[in-house]
Image (cartoon, rainbow, N blue to C red):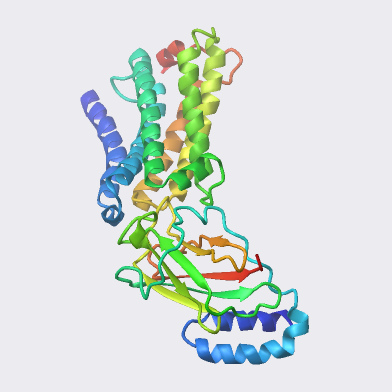
Amino acid sequence: MSTVVFNRRNLLAVGGSVLTSGVLATGVAGLLLPARAEGFAPTASMSGGANNYRKGAAIVDRIGKGGFWMSGTVRRAGDGTPLAGQRIQIWAHTTEGQEHEPQSHGATLTDKDGVFRLEMPQIIPIFGQPHGHLAYDSGEFKTVFLRPVMRSAKETSLEAHFVLQPA
Amino acid sequence: MRSVRVTLSWAALVVAVGVPMAAAAMSPQLEWRGPVYILAGFAGIVALGLALVQPLLIGGYLPGLSGYRGRRAHHWIGGALGVAVMIHVAGLWITSPPDMIDALLFASPTPFSPFGVIAMWAIFAVALLAVLRRRWELRPRTWRMAHMVFAIIIVAGSVVHSMLVEGTMETVSKAALCALILGATIKAVADLRLWRKRATSREESVVQR
C-alpha cells in the first residue's frame, strides 16, 4: 500500500506531466482513501525558514529575469488532497539580489493539482549553503516556512512540498 | 645555505596562506555579494590563515621568530585573529541579521555554524585568559594547559567550519590550508609536551631544539 502512495507522490512531483499524473492520482486516490487517511503528516517549518521573510510578496509571473525554477506541491494534511489556489511566497539570495531585498521576493498560486512553479534568478550560496525560502502564510492553514538546500550550487531548480493543516 | 632554508620556510608560509586567499579573490561568487559580505568572508579567510601562523610561531618553526620573539608575535597575531573573527561575525550580522542570530544561538540550519561559533568563543576565552592571567595569578602550567585545550578546540572547530562552508574559498586550496593547520597544531602540541607532569619550561624546550 505505502509503495502505491509513494508512487503517486513521485508522479505528482514531476513537473512535466502534471496533468496526466493529476488525472492518474485522482483515480488512485479513490481506491486508496481508507488506507491513506493518516498518510500525510503536516509539514513542519524548517529551522531558519522564516529568515529575511517579507510578508505579502506580490504574485508575479517570474521573479526578475528568471533562469531557475522553484517548484513543489501543496496538499492537505491527513488525506493529502491537492490544494488549488494556494499562495506560496518564494525568496532567496540570487544573482539579482540579496535575500532581504524586495526584488528577490515573489509569490505564485498552486494550480488545480496543487502544483506550483515559479521562475526566478539563479540561487547562489549565502551563509555557506545554496538554499531557497518558501512560505505558506495566508491564514486558512497553519503558517509553514521551508528552507530547502540545493545539492549543488550548479543546479538550476529546487523543489519544496507543503502538507498543510487547518489553522 | 641557512638563508636558503629561511627563504624557503617563509615562502612556503606565504604560498600556504596566499594561494587560498588569491583563489577566493577570484571566486565567481564575489560578483553576487555586497562589499560588507565580501569583507566578512575575507575576514574569515584571514582568520584561517592566522590559525596556521599561530602554531608555527609558538612551536618556534618560523626562522627568525623562535623563542621570545616568536611568543611575542604569537601574542599579537592572537589579538589580530580575535579582531578578524569579530569582523567576520559583524559583517555576516549586517549581511543577514536573522541568519547570524540563529548561528550565535546554535539554532542555525547550517551544520557548520556551531563549529564556527564554538571556535569563536574559544578564541575569545584564550584572549580573556591571556589578559587576566597575571591578575588572576594563574600558574604558567595552568595557563598553558588551558590555552592548549582552547587551541585544540579553536583549530578543530575552525577546520570543520571552513570545510563545510560553501563560499568563496576554492576547495583544494582550502583543504590544503586546513591540513597544514592541523599538522602544525599537532606538531606544536607534541613538541611543547604540555601535558607532562614535570614539563620542561618553554624556554628550555626551545633551547633543546
Where residue A26 sits, quadrant-wise, is bottom right
Where, quadrant-wise, is the C terminus of chain A in this rendering?
A: bottom right
Q: Nearer the viewer, residue A103 or A38?
A: A103
Work out whether residue B189 or residue B88 is closer to the camera in this orientation and state it. B88
Residue B189 vs B205, above or below: the answer is: below
Query: In percent of the image, x 57 and y 74: which residue is there?
Result: A74
Number of labelled discs?
Answer: 0
Quadrant of the frame with the N terminus of chain A: bottom right
**Residue sitting farthest toward the right:** A34
Q: Position of residue A157 (x, y in %)?
A: 42, 71
User: Relative to the observer, which residue lies in front, B180 or A121?
Assistant: A121
Residue A101 coordinates in the image, percent (x, y): 35, 56
Quarter occupied by residue A7: bottom right
User: Vertical placement of A123 versus A24: above or below?
Assistant: above
Q: Horizontal and vertical percent for residue B133?
A: 50, 12
Q: Report if residue B185 is visible in the image.
A: yes
Q: Residue, x 45% and y 22% (percent of image)? A: B127
Q: Position of residue B174 (x, y in %)?
A: 37, 46
Q: Residue at x 56, y 42 (%)?
A: B106
Can I make out residue B194 in this image? no
* Residue depicted at 30% across the width and 45% down the height: B38
